[in-house]
Amino acid sequence: MRIGEVARRAGVSVKAVRYYESLGLVAPRRLPNGYRDYGDHDVRLVREVGALVRLGIPAERTRPFVECLSAGRDHADDCPASLAGYRAAIDDLTRRIEELTARRATLAAHLRTAAYRGGGETDTDEGEDEMTETTYTTLPAGLPVPEDDGAADHLPGRAMPALTLTATSGEEVALDALGPGRTVLYLYPLSGRPDTDLPEGWNAIPGARGCTPEACGFRDHHQELTAAGATAVYGLSSQDTAYQREFAGRLRLPFAVLSDPGLELAAALDLPTFEAGGARLFRRMTLIVRDGVIEHVFHPVFPPDEHAGQVLGWLREH
């Protein structure tokens, strides 16, 4: 058969067949007219070399396998030299994996250093405008405004559930035992990190963007909130405590953030949630809890960077 037929039957390119010939792995006989004449054995050799190349073994190192087949063995790896070829390829891959792992760690360190340079005070909270020069407390114009769909109308008057969550302070906080007086509990979907992208299309989801500006607002108004009657302020989201601890430390939050990765509070109180990036997240809202009972609910919350001032105004009026 001709070279094109060999390539087709072996599942490789004509160029590959010619390269294998140049290495002496395949040696078709020559016809009187000078044309190469390939047989079934050549097809098998080419197929075996192609399969080994796809496994990551360079063609020039497949000779032990080819010689094993040419010696009449049923399989190209029936010979000791072939097994040695496997071991050598595995050793090469191990070295490459180690080198790539080390390179990846170095790149990650560079990314983290660059992302957190200057305290991370660039608009990386929500991922889609990483290269803008606005501060993380500034929201872009034109964000979609969340509608009041009545999803929180059932909450005022409900008792807080017997649910204990871990805080960034290391404490375990029982939501049904927040103590006397008013507690401000603001729920948010997902805080960003300077070195991590947030879900695609985050800006287009009504009410999604603004977790860092909201947190900064509660930070900056914290003393005023306590002076206006809040006995405690907590943030709450579904990220784990380690993730939240980085966020709280970077923003120097004077209050703890609670972690509810299983969205148990959403299940207990039938809270609204949404899906983004393959994860289920809390919709943004704030609960004013007084003596264990939800006294007031802010929902929807918009704009989030002004929300702490809205809560402060309500506390002062009440």
Image (cartoon, rainbow, N blue to C red):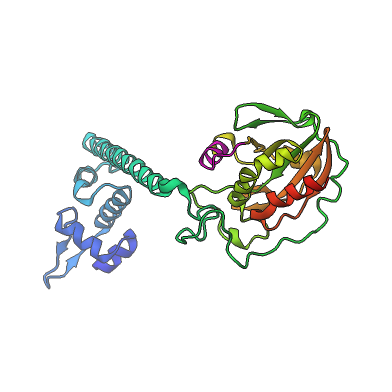
Vertical comparison of 299 with 291: above or below: below
- Vertical position of residue 292 compared to residue 29: above or below: above
* Res 104 → quadrant: top left
Q: Is residue 246 magenta?
A: yes
Q: Position of 115 compared to 29: left or right?
A: right
| Magenta segment boundaries in residue numbering | 244-254
User: Which image quadrant: the C terminus?
Assistant: top right
- For residue 293, which quarter of the picture? top right
Q: 80 or 221: nearer the eye?
A: 221
**Whole-percent x, y for residue 262 in the image:** 68, 38
The residue nearer to you, when weighing 45 against 74, is 45
User: Quarter of the image containing the N terminus?
Assistant: bottom left
**Picture coordinates of residue 288 (x, y %)?**
78, 42
Is any part of residue 237 visible from this angle?
no
Foreground of the two, 43 or 60: 60
The secondary structure that most of the magenta stretch takes on is helix
For the point 65% across and 30% down, the residue is 166
121, above or below 204, in the image: above
Query: Would residue 187 be found to the left or right of residue 13 on screen?
Result: right
Is 306 within the magenta?
no
Give the left or right position of residue 296, taking residue 171 as reference. Answer: right
